[in-house]
Image (spheres, helix red, strand yellow):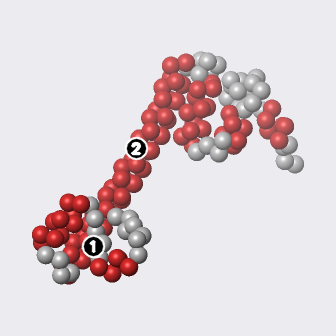
Amino acid sequence: MKDSYEDVMSKQYGGSHYKGHKIQPWEIWEAYDMNGWEASALKYLLRHKYKGDFIGDLMKAKHNIEYLIAREERKQRVQNQTSEGQSAKVIENIVRELRSSEISPAEASEIASKGIWRRTSDYDDDAPLGI
């Protein structure tokens, strides 16, 4: 026979540092759809006063939070590198089109200095090019 939700929630193995509270950490984890590092950091913050390792649990929470920060910074670096790579591809395409067009180097320089790049065929409407 399986334990009911209430039976499972009333048990704690390895201490009583969660059992006496109105809400269990895993209920918060579930409600906030936390990943392992977020859940672990919260667990250490919630128990640090009750488990007997005040500084140790705070250091563990800090370590998990430091990992989350490093992970987000890494994601941003990858996104920035991807964006820079896409910008480089746009510039390469512009250079390729300039080389294949009948624009003189002086005209190309003037276009680049104005921040404008439109082909002759683009002049049939007033829509911005978006580059």
Can residue 51 be seen in this snapshot? yes
The residue to which callout 2 is attached is 73
Nearer the observer, disc 2 or disc 1? 1
The residue to which callout 1 is attached is 93
Displayed quadrant of residue 78: bottom left
Can residue 89 be seen in this snapshot? no
Q: How many marks?
A: 2
- Give coordinates of residue 46: x percent, y percent: 63, 26
Say whether residue 130 is left or right of residue 46: left
- Give coordinates of residue 15: x percent, y percent: 69, 25
Between the C-alphas of marks 2 and 1, the distance is: 30 Å
Circle 2: residue type: Glu
**Tag 2 near tag 1, CB within 8 Å:** no
Residue drawn at x 60%, y 38% is: 39
Kind of element beneath mark 2: helix
Decide: is 41 above or below 1: above
Residue drawn at x 87%, y 48% is: 1
Circle 1: residue type: Asn
* Residue situated in front as seen by the camera: 85 or 100: 100
* Residue situated in front as seen by the camera: 121 or 37: 121
- Give coordinates of residue 60: x percent, y percent: 50, 29
First reached walking from the N terminus: tag 2 or tag 1: 2
How dense is the environment of label 2, judged by Cα within 10 Å: few (below 14), some, or many (20 and up)? few
Residue drawn at x 18%, y 81% is: 102
Kind of element beneath mark 1: helix
Displayed quadrant of residue 33: top right
How dense is the environment of label 1, judged by Cα within 10 Å: few (below 14), some, or many (20 and up)? few
Decide: is 35 above or below 115: above
- Give coordinates of residue 50: x percent, y percent: 64, 19
Q: Quadrant of the C terminus?
A: bottom left
- Residue 7, numbered circle: none
